[in-house]
Amino acid sequence: MAELEEDHRRTERPTTSIVANHGSSIPFRSVGSFSIPAIITGMWQVAGGHGKIDQKKAVEEMKRYAFAGLGVFDMADIYGPAEEIYGKFLREYLGANLVLGFTKFVPRYGSSGTNTREVVESSIDRSRKRMGVSTLDMVQFHWWDYRDVHYFDSMKLLYTLKLEGKIKELGLTNFDTLHMAKLYEECAIPIVSNQVAYSIIDRRPEKKMVAWCLKHNVKILAYGSLLGGFLSEKYLGRPEPQRFELTTQSLSKYKRTIDQWGGWMLFQELLLVLSQIADKYKVSISNVAVRYIADKPAVAAVIIGARLSIAEHITSNQATFSFPGLDQGDVALIHAVVEKGNGIAGDCGDEYR
Ligand SMILES: NC(=O)c1ccc[n+]([C@@H]2O[C@H](COP(=O)([O-])OP(=O)(O)OC[C@H]3O[C@@H](n4cnc5c(N)ncnc54)[C@H](OP(=O)(O)O)[C@@H]3O)[C@@H](O)[C@H]2O)c1
């Protein structure tokens, strides 16, 4: 593991040192009442299964993320200590840059009571307490089983809590287009975003989600855009990783995506093309992969996972917007390889159902 990390640092392209970002190169985009940087820092990686987190170091690192203009953090009530780490960070942070904590309400599969105020409110209150805030900046709602129609009740209750000042904005996560539209229409509740998987090889949002989002001014917050780190120099020219080498839950998850799409040999072809484009703009493969998604219609931000206290890519990710963006030729080269694969079947979030 340590060896892999050391190797990673060696292969990643050098970037400039951390610079404060007051909206300089990373653009700001609107999501509901917020104006947020187009890169969000993801905290699933502190939930376990991604290496041992040193919480004190993680808090220090979050201060550097905020200083670098990457101070919007994505977490969830089910991400282990993430909300508490955010709370500690918030108590200590003295900087002037924007800091926001986006969390999620993820009721357990088949759990009853999510149609009652008691259950929904106690979960929201727990997040408020852990994060040390009276109002949660954003709550993104996840639902496992659409056959259980209690999700309408849960959403209405979340909206009541929003009106009462416990939540600032409401979003969704992993909703497909049909059920997002149902929820939106039936509850008439202003939903500002849907957080879904979206990467160069997993373009499911483009089937229906993007058009619906554009029509209703709902923003996409994209995750998995780096395929857990596979979209980087570290894996260029590398043999297919064996199961024991998939050292994080994220790598295991997205290795399945790669296999579903077209397999390791085709993925190497894709990395090669991305590395040529990266060379052209003097950035990294990861920068190209994130930028490809960040500039897509309806996308407000890409959530990039951070293994806080273990590995950080602040300067590298700051370089995402250091170049003018991909031109038509770059996109054609990428698509020529991507289209040799199968595409990922279904709509957003289907993998959770
Ligand atoms: N709603 C949901 O169901 C859901 C599901 C998954 C994720 N998410 C959210 O999305 C976030 C992103 O997580 P993800 O699992 O999809 O991972 P990801 O963002 O695709 O990949 C994150 C990994 O990419 C590597 N990386 C980051 N920046 C890099 C750079 N500039 N150069 C090279 N490598 C770089 C790092 O690997 P190393 O640490 O190994 O260096 C990092 O751990 C999560 O934290 C979470 O907030 C949400």
Image (cartoon, helix red, strand yellow):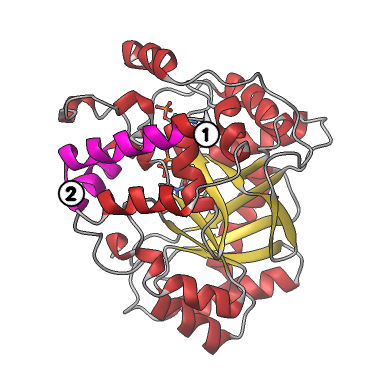
350 relative position to 61: left or right:
left
In-front residue for pair 134/11 = 11
Task: Name the amino acid type tagged 1.
Answer: Tyr
Q: Quadrant of residue 214?
A: bottom right
Q: Quadrant of residue 299?
A: bottom right
Q: Residue at x 39, y 72 (%)?
A: 176
Q: Which residues are magenta?
A: 252-278
Task: Residue 78: give x, y in percent of width and height.
Answer: 46, 48
Above or below, comparing residue 145 to residue 329 in the picture:
below
Residue at the bottom extreme, as displayed:
186
In-front residue for pair 144/71 = 71
Q: Is mark 1 within 8 Å of ligand 1?
A: no
- Which residue lies under the disc numbered 1? 281
Quadrant of the image containing the C terminus: bottom left
Residue 262 has which mark?
Answer: 2
Quadrant of the image containing the N terminus: top left
